[in-house]
Image (cartoon, rainbow, N blue to C red):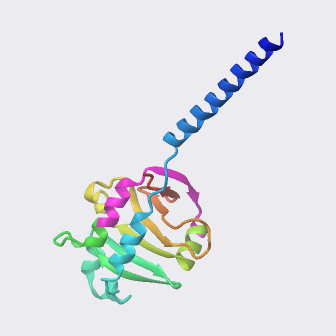
Amino acid sequence: MKKMLLIIILIVTILVISILATGYYWNSLNSKQKDASWVGTINQMLENYSLFPNSTEQNNPNVLATYCRVYLYENKTSDLVEFGDLNNNQTLSVYLNNLLTKVNTQLNTISADSLNKTLTNDKVIEIIYRGATQHFGGQQKFSVGYFVLSDNLNEGLTGIVITQEIGTQSFSLWEIAK
């Protein structure tokens, strides 16, 4: 009888260990890690840019007529970094547009107040598309993309993309999963 009980305990132990190992393996295959490598790339790209004065938009109608504009939010200010000209290959706007085509994991929604707090306190780069050109470069889902480069509020937002879908007023948190 004792021998039979030991065999049953051994079999149950082996089954439990097998189930746990299989579950761990399955979870590791299905859990994706956030790819935030683009944060360093954008920061390096920004080192080569000169900010446009805030009056550029009013003085240059070509800025408002472009397919997109790129703004940097930092130190409680926003500055125009680049305006997309379809005749030129604007490096930063093309890179940001390509990133928007890669967002693949929606995390949550965010309120407009929370977005404003993030833009005021964190380092964020924004690409905003003009209505008629929202489908530029294969990116057909978002009218605005905010890329969080540094999170000074310690909310875990570095490497997160905040988007506004075309035709909506709501904002969503996304990441690019590896």
Q: Residue furthest right?
A: 1
Q: Give the percent coordinates (x, y) of residue 165.
A: 44, 56
Given residues 68 and 151, the one toward you in this image is 151
Which residue is nearer to you in this view: 122 or 65? 122
Q: Does 166 sit above or below residue 2? A: below
Q: x, y (%) of residue 150?
A: 51, 74
Residue extending farthest to the top is: 1
Q: Nearer the viewer, residue 118 or 150?
A: 150
Quadrant in the picture for the N terminus = top right
The percent coordinates of residue 166 (x first, y second) are 41, 56
> What stretch of residues is rendered in magenta?
95-113
Q: Is residue 11 left or right of residue 140?
A: right
What residue lies at 38% left-to-right and 69% top-to-bottom? 127
In this view, 170 is above or below 115: above
Based on the displayed image, in which of its 4 quarters is residue 111 positioned?
bottom right
Residue 174, given in percent of the width and then of the height, sits at 49, 56
Q: Is residue 8 magenta?
A: no
Q: Which residue is drawn at the image coordinates 55% and 79% (left, top)?
A: 120
Quadrant position of residue 143: bottom left
Residue drawn at point x = 77 percent, y = 18 percent: 6
Q: How many marks?
A: 0
Q: Is residue 58 found left or right of 174 in the rendered image?
A: left
Give whichever of 35, 54 is nearer the camera.
35
The residue sitting at the left extreme is 87
Does residue 104 belong to the magenta stretch? yes
Establish if 143 lies above or below 126.
Answer: above
Does residue 158 lie above or below 31 as drawn? below
